[in-house]
Amino acid sequence: MTILVWFRNDLRIDDHAPLVAAAKRGAPVVPVVCVDLDLPRQTQFGFSRLGPHRARFWLEGLADLRSQLRSLGSDLVVTRGRPEDVLPELVAPMNVEEVHFHRGFAVDERTEEDNLARRCPQVRWQGHWGNLLVTPDQAPFAVSEVPETFTAFRKKIGARAEIPHPRPAPLALPALPPGVEPGTIPTLDHLGLTSVPADARAQITLTGGAAAGRDRVAHYIWREDRLRGYKDTRNGMLAADDSTKFSAWLAHGALSPRWVLEQIRTYEQERVANDSTYWLFFELLWRDYFQYIALKHGARLFKAGGLRGLRLPWRRDPALIDAWCAGETGFPLVDASMKELAATGYTSNRARQNVASFFTKVLGQDWRIGAAWFESQLIDYDPASNWGNWAYAAGVGNDARGFRYFHLPKQARDYDPEGAFVRHWLPALAKVPTRWLPEPYRAPADVQASAGLGDAYPRPIVDLESAVNATRKAYERVDPPAPPSRRRGRRRQ
Ligand SMILES: Cc1cc2nc3c(=O)[nH]c(=O)nc-3n(C[C@H](O)[C@H](O)[C@H](O)COP(=O)(O)OP(=O)(O)OC[C@H]3O[C@@H](n4cnc5c(N)ncnc54)[C@H](O)[C@@H]3O)c2cc1C
């Protein structure tokens, strides 16, 4: 008999329950990954589900996983196709009796698991929970009882001390059985994608794989000692070390969140335990929370009405959507963020909140289109975190009540006070005085002329205040505001 370990978004060998369980069985083990070459051609709202930034990072992660597995005496078998098509074909020739894998949280991943179990009932499909701080089998609530708000979730999860330590990687694995070919890792070409040249303006290069992920952790926490001040810098939009940039490795599973927590714990013992060290744990808990929300709500998370089922009159205006995607809205904070996203596959949390708020609350466009664009662009794309945050930004997530939006000029003053981020990504605005940078076309004509504005930068595609008011009215018709005394606290920003 043979045991398969099916790798999905868990491209690592440490803290990997499926690998540990398979290694213990004393039978031949075949680590396998399925690369669906059609993924970039699957579209949602016209956008590819896998763009070149994430694809590149993913393929690098596979190469790294292969070398990790080789260091244990095994290898990574790389197959081409959808898991539902490919894995059943391996069962008979390899005499597969068990498949160990990490269970998914979003509806597509769970459907994939169900389909496989239906197609090959003779195989023992052994799903393991992982990729979280607190897994559903250890949580103090059933999936159907997952608290809807983050605060309630965090309180119920209980003490950080109870979160288990990460599992070590197996010391060794059996070699691949004779005749099992590891196969080659596809290239971007095979996926029909063209690589995006590195953009000189990028502040950081994100390289896939656990080795690069661990090096980023070593850089941020240990060498540069940035964890000490994380809470104060995490909202910064420009510098690489303003926030951790761990998200891409966490999303692909090259880093385990429990391993990151272990680093925080060690740092607290060896250097300092403060608000910042707690805050990174807090952010990782947000990540857990969105996975639980995806698990609980299934397909609802991806519907226009979101978790609250609100029947908002979302619009689809191709000109507005194109301008937003291209970073040509005439609102510098939005445009700088969207240019950064397209050029690098990353933009900060602050930027994501601003552009999502602008897309939904100012432009009034269907939030799922924005989420789908992010899906195609983000290196750290993760279904639960992306669609959960988008639903929240659109006001259709369960943790959100009432019409709230991010006022761009205020966001610029608070988070880009000198305009460094905007000028970095929008050189056409280099000479605009900081005071006018949030809305350059409101500057007096002589200021515009001496800044060389001319036609170098687009005019605003909407009037900010009237656009917001129109969306607000539409929103409040569907979800009237509660009286002031009953309004709930704001989420932390
Ligand atoms: C509209 C929108 C879409 C988003 N889409 C994604 C996505 O597809 N994938 C993704 O990983 N994050 C997503 N986020 C969350 C957040 O923006 C990124 O995790 C963060 O910007 C990554 O940068 P960092 O690693 O430096 O974050 P840090 O500030 O250093 O945070 C540390 C880690 O905590 C987790 N985290 C922090 N904030 C959040 C959050 N709000 N939700 C979930 N996890 C969080 C991430 O794993 C992150 O790496 C989205 C946020 C918004 C507003």
Image: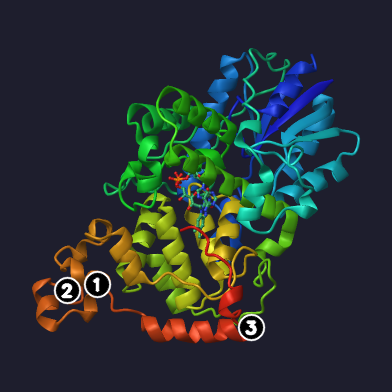
Q: CA distance from mark 3 to mark 2?
A: 41 Å
Q: Amino acid at mark 3?
A: Val
Which corner quadrant of the image does residue 455 belong to? bottom left
Q: Residues within 10 Å of mark 1 (few under 14, many from 20)?
A: some
Residue that label 1 marks: 457
Earlier-in-chain disc, 3 versus 1: 1
Q: Position of residue 86 (x, y in %)?
A: 73, 39
Q: Residue at x 53, y 76 (%)?
A: 403
- The answer to whether any part of residue 52 appears in the image is yes
Looking at the picture, tell me which residue is in the foreground, 232 or 459.
232
Q: Is residue 355 left or right of residue 388?
A: left
Mark 3 or mark 2: which is in front?
3
Whether label 2 touches label 1, CB < 8 Å: yes
Q: Amino acid at mark 2?
A: Leu
Q: How is the image coloured?
A: rainbow
Residue that label 3 marks: 478
Looking at the picture, tell me which residue is in the foreground, 284 or 304.
284
Q: Quadrant of the N terminus?
A: top right
Q: Amino acid at mark 1?
A: Tyr
Q: Position of residue 201 (x, y in %)?
A: 27, 49
